[in-house]
Image (cartoon, helix red, strand yellow):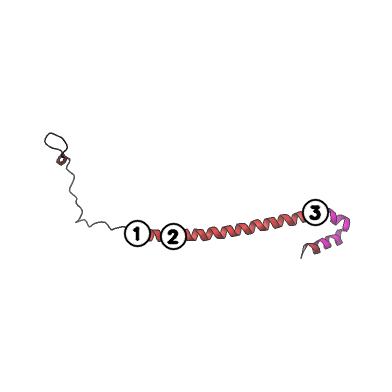
Amino acid sequence: MDFKSVRDSITEKLGSENSGVIADDFANMMTLEKEFNDKYENLEKENQKLKEHNEKLISANANLLMKVGSEVKPPKDEEEVDEKPFNFASVFDEKGNFKK
């Protein structure tokens, strides 16, 4: 169905005088519908782009986490850790001055 067939149908039902009165309103409704459909299509395209961008970011972050995880060195065994407490007196001489 196209605009001409709808217009002809309205003209047939209402007569040419009455159909002319509503023709402008009908054309305005069609313009609004087209604008709405265009905006909807643009939003759908933008939504798809954002989904694709989000998937790429998730993939990149996962790759970075895997890389960082493989570069982290495991902690030393307990035997290798020096657990001697720090002795503050060892940094001072007998007069209380810092050792050089």
Tell me where residue 26 appears, x and y as whole percent: 78, 56
**Secondary structure of residue under mark 2:** helix
Q: Quadrant of the C terminus?
A: top left
Q: CA distance from mark 2 to mark 3?
A: 54 Å
Q: Which residue is label 1 attached to?
A: 69
Q: Which residue is label 2 attached to?
A: 60
Q: Please identify the residue farthest to the top as the structure is shown.
A: 95
Q: Which residues are magenta?
A: 6-26
Q: Pick whichever of labels 1 and 3 is earlier in the sequence.
A: 3
Pick the front one: 91 or 7: 91
Disc 2 packing (10 Å; few <14; some 14–19; many ≥20): few
Q: Nearer the viewer, mark 2 or mark 1?
A: 2
Above or below, comparing residue 93 to residue 67 in the picture: above
- Labelled pair 2, 3 in contact (Cβ < 8 Å): no
Going by the numbered disc 3, the residue's amino acid type is: Asp
- Residue beneath the point at 88% across and 58% down: 16
Magenta stretch containing residue 76, yes or no? Answer: no
Tell me where residue 31 appears, x and y as whole percent: 73, 55
Q: Which residue is label 3 attached to?
A: 24
Disc 1 packing (10 Å; few <14; some 14–19; many ≥20): few
Going by the numbered disc 1, the residue's amino acid type is: Gly
Q: Pick whichever of labels 2 and 1 is earlier in the sequence.
A: 2
Q: Please identify the residue farthest to the left as the structure is shown.
A: 94
Query: From the viewer's perspective, is 87 left or right of 17?
Result: left
Above or below, comparing residue 94 to residue 60 in the picture: above
Dominant secondary structure, magenta: helix
Q: CA distance from mark 2 to mark 1?
A: 14 Å
Q: Quadrant of residue 36?
A: bottom right
